[in-house]
Structure formats: C-alpha cells, structure tokens
Amino acid sequence: MSSRKRTLLLESLIREVRRFIASAILFNQKVADEVGMNLTDLQVLGILELQGSATPRQLADLTGLSSGGVTVVLDRLEKASYLRRERNPDDRRSVIVRPILASLQKLQGYYEGKVEFTQQIAAQFSDAELETVISFFARAAGG
C-alpha cells in the first residue's frame, strides 16, 4: 500500500472515530438528561456495569477522575440506588463498589435500539473483520 493511501486511510479513520465519539457523547448526554443524572455519573455507572465491580481506586484509574471526584460520583449513584459499597475482603481500608442490577434495568431501554443497530452492522462483517474491529476498540480504549 502506498504511503499516500495509508495517510488518507488514517485521516479517514481519525475523522470517523471523532464522529463516533461525538455521536456517543451526545446520545449519552440525552440519556443522562432523561434519567436526571449528569453525564459523568452515567459513564462511571456504565464502566462499573462493564467491570461488574471495582474499587474506587480502580474507577479513578479507569475514568481519569481524582479519588475525591470518584467519591462524589459514588455518593450520588449510591443515593440514587444505582450501586452499593461493600467491604473489600482483601483490604479492610477499601470498599468494593457493585452496581445494583435491578436499577440498571431502568437504563436498558435507552440502549436497546443502539444494540440492535450495532448487531445489524456487525452482521455485515466476517468474523475476522469483527475481530479486527474489536481489537482496534480494545486498544483505543486502553490509550
């Protein structure tokens, strides 16, 4: 592949990733507004749902929030019954935060259309292509 074509492909990729991120942020802001939550709280809850459980330190590392910022978010989410804090059996100075699954179900309706749309798009790709897309997003999320 020529270096010119590679440059154009990379520029196109960056443009489409930016478009995807903007769309996701705007959609999630709409969901947050509709459920009476701020966007940061919704995103921390989403990360917690994906993780299953986490310590506040792990959430700080995953989100880039300060430990104090994570505490404020967790306080709001706990008060709204979206999560609970439990003693950490491995470190008595720490807690483990777990989402309350029944409360998360209230949010699922907002995302059903996005899940179906993603499945329709994914059906157009081979398994190998999906593995490449998954690898890209996994690496991008880590950076």
Image: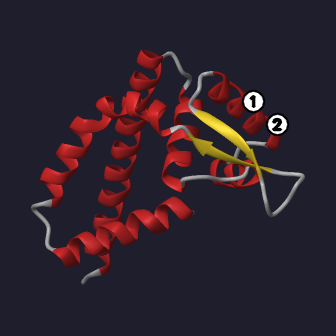
Quarter-wise, where is residue 131 in the image?
Answer: bottom left
Q: Which mark is residue 68?
A: 2
Mark 2 surroundings: few (<14), some (14-19) or many (≥20) residues within 10 A: few
Whole-percent x, y for residue 84 in the image? 65, 37
**Whether label 2 touches label 1, CB < 8 Å:** yes
Give residue 28's quadrant in the image. top left
Tell me where residue 19 appears, x and y as whole percent: 34, 43
Q: Amino acid at mark 1?
A: Val
Q: CA distance from mark 2 to mark 1?
A: 6 Å
Colouring scheme applied when the structure was drawn: secondary structure
| Left or right of 110 on screen, residue 64 | right
**32 w.r.t. 114: above or below:** above
Q: Which residue is mark 1?
A: 72
In the displayed image of the protein, which residue is found farthest to the bottom?
1
Compared with 57, 28 (above or below) is above
Image x and y of residue 62, in percent: 64, 53
Which secondary structure lies at badge 2? helix
